Image (spheres, rainbow, N blue to C red):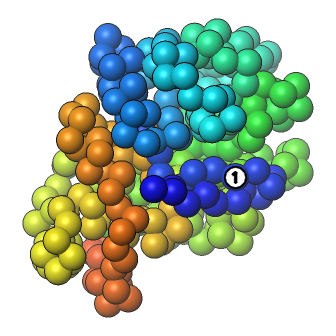
Amino acid sequence: MTIPALTLNDGHTIPQLGFGVFKVDPAETERIVSEALAAGYRHIDTAAIYGNEEGVGRAIAASGIPREELFVTTKLWFEDQAGDKPLAAIDTSLDKLGLDRVDLYLSHWPAPKNGHFVNAWERMIEIRDAGKATSIGVSNHLPEHLEKVIAATGVTPAVDQIELHPAYQQRDVTSFAAGRGILIEAWGPLGQGKYPLFEEEPVAAAAAAHGKTPAQVVLRWHLQQGHIVFPKSSTPERIRENLDVFGFALTDDEQAAITALERGGRVSAHPDEVN
């Protein structure tokens, strides 16, 4: 099985499907990430605030997989945006991961009331230029935040990782990003179980038609939308199931019906409220 790779605006590539460890118990992270790597995942998405970078690092070290075959993302927490704090934060993350660089480093939230997200981006450019991150991007940034970091530096983020699922597609952000070559990474791609997504008629019908689970159908919808996606699970069966989404394709009608589920259904915090 080959996971498709997308090309970032800096010329580097990223596996379109990865494995997320948001809210994964630090004590269980090594086991769970090891299961994911054994299943065939090569893209791991973590963050400083998750508290499980060390477990990710141990799983990578134990896997024996060559570093060049892996794609590792971590994120700068907003409390470390000011001054030179980002420069220390990346070193801490790399130490915990046991790596000399990450493939992608993201500014986790703009935290606009704190007023440091532009400084954070400036420091992240330094981190990239120092070779500690191959590519840099942002997470939870709205168009007004993206405009400010681009205007201040002339450097456009490679990705914007945002809450995105069928009920909440953030078309203002995705449209802005598309016009600037910023790829979209969808977090909470299955709605975090906070609404009955799998019972929606277009999802259930497509699952029945293709002999797939509703989760596989929604992940397939994301892939066909061009999103980068990294579902999370702690069970080996579900970990493997979430990877088994490349042997079928939704029809144009099925894709459109799922897209039509948009209803402004955010299930997490608004970026302006996280400070």
Horizontal side of residue 44 vs 75, given as left or right? left
Residue appearing at x 73%, y 24% in the figure: 101
Q: Is residue 256 above or below residue 140?
A: below
The N terminus lies in quadrant: bottom left
- Locate residue 220: give its quadrant: bottom left
Q: Residue furthest bottom?
A: 253
- Residue nearest the viewer, comparing 96 with 70: 70
Horizontal side of residue 176 vs 49, given as left or right? right
- In the picture of the structure, the residue carrying the numbered disc 1 is 13
Horizontal side of residue 32 vs 235, given as left or right? right
- Locate residue 247: give its quadrant: bottom left
Residue appearing at x 13%, y 75% in the figure: 208
Q: Is residue 258 above or below residue 253?
A: above
- Residue nearest the viewer, comparing 67 with 128: 67
Kind of residue indicated by mark 1: Thr
Q: Is residue 211 above or below residue 81?
A: below
Residue appearing at x 21%, y 34% in the figure: 235
Q: Residues within 10 Å of mark 1 (few under 14, many from 20)?
A: some
Residue appearing at x 49%, y 16% in the figure: 62
**Rendering coords of residue 106 (x, y %):** 63, 36
**Rendering coords of residue 23 (x, y %):** 33, 27
